[in-house]
Image: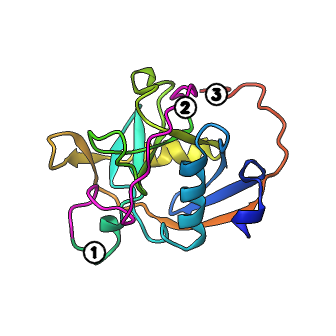
Amino acid sequence: MDLDQTDLATVEAAVVTDKGTMVVTFFPEQAPKHARSFLDLAQKGFYNGIAFHRIVRNFMVQTGCPNSRRGAVGQPGTGGPGFRLQAEFNDIPHTRGILSMARSSDPNSAGSQFFIVQGEHADYLDGQYTVFGKVEEGLDVLDQIANIDCDFGPGGERSQPKERVEIRRIELRPRQERTPAVAENGGE
């Protein structure tokens, strides 16, 4: 896919994981550099084999660190693509299924790591992290990942998954038309 000649709002990504596939759409109007960077990295295969290295049930799952690949050196959660993005904070709220860029305490330090909100909302993150996409299909996959048992990690947070789950690949394709779900969490 030629991303230079494509309206990024017409693109979706199938994030194929060990637990199933999540289909993601993007917000290029609100976060053009972040949406473009993610799609560039995905198309180059950067995310292939990268694990979900931080999981906090009822909050979010985080991935995108090259240090989480099998055989990689370095602490998972500390790696990136070799560049940083300027923050593109916007007014999209951090609700269930939202993709947002992880960063250090420097607002302009996002690179390749991102998180997907699994809880209903994390409004305390609004305006502080760049929202750039949303899970359109596969919230059940997100829940499977979020429900993996975790140990205490290096930061003292119970977020280090006991089971490895990784992104096998990300497939970019034209965005599909979807009918809105009648009840997002019907029967839960």
First along the sequence among labels 1 and 2: 1
In this figure, which residue is indicated by the disc labeled 2?
96
**Horizontal arrangement in the rendering, residue 50 relative to residue 21 (left or right):** left
- Specify the principal SS of the magenta part: loop
Residue 27 position in % (x across, y down): 65, 41
Decide: few, some or many residues near mark 1? Use Cα within 10 Å; few <14, some 14-19, many ≥20: few
Amino acid found under the numbered disc labelled 2: Arg
Q: Residue at x 43, y 35 (%)?
A: 129
Q: Residue at x 65, y 46 (%)?
A: 26
Give the number of the disc on residue 128. Answer: none
Q: Please report the bounds of the magenta region as a residue range.
A: 74-95
Q: Are marks 1 and 3 in contact (CB under 8 Å)?
A: no
Q: Are marks 3 and 2 in contact (CB under 8 Å)?
A: no
Q: Residue at x 68, y 26 (%)?
A: 186
Residue 140 position in % (x across, y down): 58, 43
Residue 172 position in % (x across, y down): 69, 64
Decide: few, some or many residues near mark 2? Use Cα within 10 Å; few <14, some 14-19, many ≥20: many
In this figure, which residue is indicated by the disc labeled 3?
185
Amino acid found under the numbered disc labelled 3: Asn
Give yes or no for residue 84 being in the magenta stretch: yes
Q: Quadrant of the C terminus?
A: top right
Q: Nearer the viewer, mark 3 or mark 2?
A: 2
Residue 152 falls in which quadrant of the image?
A: top left
The alpha-carbon separation of the residues under discs 1 and 3 comes to 38 Å
Q: Secondary structure at mark 2?
A: loop
Residue 112 falls in which quadrant of the image?
A: bottom left
Q: Is residue 100 visible?
A: yes
In this figure, which residue is indicated by the disc labeled 1?
72
Residue 42 position in % (x across, y down): 56, 65
